[in-house]
Image (spheres, coloured by chain):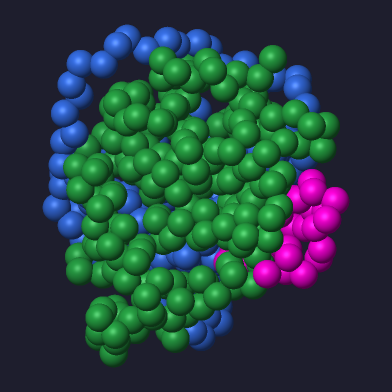
Amino acid sequence: MKKFFVSFAVVATFVGYALRQHFHVGQDDALPIGSSPNSSTTSTSTTNNSEVSVPVNNTSSFTPTNTSTRVRSSGAYRNGTYTGTVADAFYGNVQVQASIKGGKLVDVQFLQYPNDRGHSIEVSNVSTPILRQEAIQAQNANVDIVSGATATSQAFQQSLASALSQAK
Amino acid sequence: MKVSRRLMGMPITVEVIDHRVIPEQIDRVFGYFHSVDELFSTYKPTSEISRLNAGTLKRDESHHKVQTVLRLAEETKSLTGGYFDVYRHGHLDPSGLVKGWAIEQATKLLQHEGLQNYYIAAGGDIAAAGQNSQGQAWRVGIRHPFHKDEVVKVVAIGDAGVATSGTYERGEHIYNPRHGYGAANEIASLTVIGPNIYEADRFATAAFAMGQKGIHFIERRPGLEGYMIDLDGTATMTTGFDQYLAS
């Protein structure tokens, strides 16, 4: 079930994000708000550890397909399920399937997602010194390079955008 | 000379300060990344990793680089208490190790050319050497995990690697089945500074998967320093992190 809940959490987060992106055009272009501390997606968390595999398509033909009938509605998109293109998130693919109901994006399923995480055994937290903490603060400083991370979210946006473009 | 290209789904930048650098030297770096992609890509059916998974290639018949990475993966799994594992349900995916390893190998191409002042940045991971164009330590910003255009910390490094594992790079890391996405005790990003990018990247990836405990894991590893940011915007740093703080 892990994958299921993983997907569920991801979906909940990114649906919120996508709705923000697509129905609040003009607002700031922040990254998914699910990362904020008051995220509502915590409700999807679980302690269940069993597994459900996620379908993975490893063929090289990645043409988008419309997998259900479309019904015109009053919303911004046509009802149906739309599969986005496979987007490369560095040695792993992101591919999403967007579901539109009532003209709105109601669900995003991950068909592919990079797997590089180790599984779980507890690593003992033997005594280490109390580590210093601080509140993070944006710095106004020149830098040569930035260390950070965007690959998967970019791939997600790319795949979702392609799915939604079919729903228009 | 600074060149950026998009390869393997991520932006890769190579900047060399030494005046003697020639474009062919930088081209060779990108050529190397391309060759790594051909061998290790999990989405190209012709790659050795895909063929290993399909059962059409045996491990002991694979490219020596593939065998090297698989050996390193086993070592890393053991060093991280299983948190770093390139096998999932019998499916091989060494991506989490290959990135840092490939960047580190690429820096050796520049070293062998006698170049001394450069960095290679790929997908947010950085391998640096020498000094920047002002003759000072490289200034590396740690990206704000919630505002991608801002940095929250600046570190100054010479010959070192800096890797950040975070919500937006390796999304799956945050979906720890025991805590779920967005749980209060989970973290938004973990930046690790190490002697090289291979060390920094593999331990950043593994430690991020450990959640709050990850920063203590980094604290205990000699030669590594870390800066962890919680989802509520609180940062926790290892005891030696201060030595890298830029003035």
Residue B182 or B70: which is nearer the viewer?
Answer: B70
Q: Residue at x 75, y 29 (%)?
A: B136
Q: Residue at x 53, y 41 (%)?
A: B161
Left or right, A4 with respect to A110, comes to: left
Left or right, A1 with respect to B183, comes to: left
Residue B5 against residue A83 in the figure, above or below: above
**Residue B143's spot in the image, x, y percent?**
61, 33
Residue A103 or B192: which is nearer the viewer?
Answer: B192
Q: Residue at x 76, y 50 (%)?
A: B16
**Residue B125's spot in the image, x, y percent?**
56, 46
**Residue B86's spot in the image, x, y percent?**
29, 60
Q: Residue at x 79, y 32 (%)?
A: B135
| Chain letter matching colour green | B
Residue B100 against residue A134 in the figure, above or below: below
Residue B14 or B16: which is nearer the viewer?
Answer: B16
Q: Quadrant of residue A166?
A: bottom right
Quadrant in which the C terminus of chain B appears: top right
Q: Is residue B167 visible?
A: no
**Residue A82's spot in the image, x, y percent?**
52, 70
Q: Is residue B238 visible?
A: yes
Q: Magenta residues, as a range?
A: B1-28
| Chain letter matching colour blue | A
Residue B14 is one of the magenta-drawn residues: yes
Q: Quadrant of residue B226?
A: top left
